[in-house]
Amino acid sequence: MEKLDRYDVRILCELQRDSSLTNTELAERVGLSPPPCWRRVRKLEEQGVVQNYVALLDAAMVGYPESVFVEVKFSDHNPVSTARFEKVIQDQPEILECYATSGSSDYLLKIAITGISSYHEFLSSRLMALEGVSHFDTRFVLKTIKYTTALPVSQSPGNAPSL
């Protein structure tokens, strides 16, 4: 992949702020005319830098007022057990994020829940039933201090300086 120049960085920053911008609006914000702006956006998409466009929802307003983080530890690292776990995780819409981690746990999950009883049901009927899982450590989110999906593109190594 080619190094991102200042226009690419500006395009990426603007798209992270508002991906519903028209090409004309985006071009105006980054200081390009619409045709080269469109070509740059398409190139960033083709290279996989821009992977998708989504709408970010207010979780509480759509019925998920609570979030939990769950550390999962396995009793062994049997490839069959971990593959089955990862497959089950993929099929659970409440699980927003899952990471294989180093340290005292093997996985970290972020789960959207409707309340403690729904989490208990989810935990006991789905996660605790999985072979190889030996321990869960749950952290209930009390208050969100910072939430963003925007990456600090202008500060990435190898990119042009911040504009």
Image (tube, helix red, strand yellow):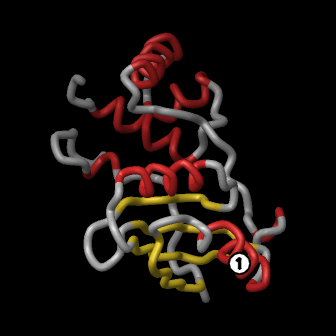
Q: Nearer the viewer, residue 71 or 56?
A: 71
Label tally: 1
Residue 154: x %, y % from top left: 30, 47
The residue lying at 40 percent from left, 17 percent from top is 43
Res 122 → quadrant:
bottom right
Image height of 117 relative to 107, above or below: below
Residue 113: x %, y % from top left: 72, 72
Position of 79 with respect to 161 (left or right) is: right
The residue lying at 50 percent from left, 41 percent from top is 14
Position of 63 with respect to 32 (left or right) is: right
Q: Residues within 10 Å of mark 1 (few under 14, many from 20)?
A: some
Q: Nearer the viewer, residue 152 or 35?
A: 152
Image height of 161 relative to 74, above or below: above
**What amino acid type is highlighted by mark number 1?**
Tyr
Q: Nearer the viewer, residue 35 or 77?
A: 77
Q: The residue tagged with tag 1: helix, strand or loop?
A: helix
Residue denoted by label 1: 119
The residue lying at 61 percent from left, 61 percent from top is 95
Residue 81: x %, y % from top left: 44, 57
Q: Nearer the viewer, residue 114 or 26?
A: 114
Residue lying at the far left in this picture: please name it: 158
Residue 101: x %, y % from top left: 33, 65
Position of 52 with respect to 76 (left or right) is: right
Position of 42 with respect to 66 (left or right) is: left
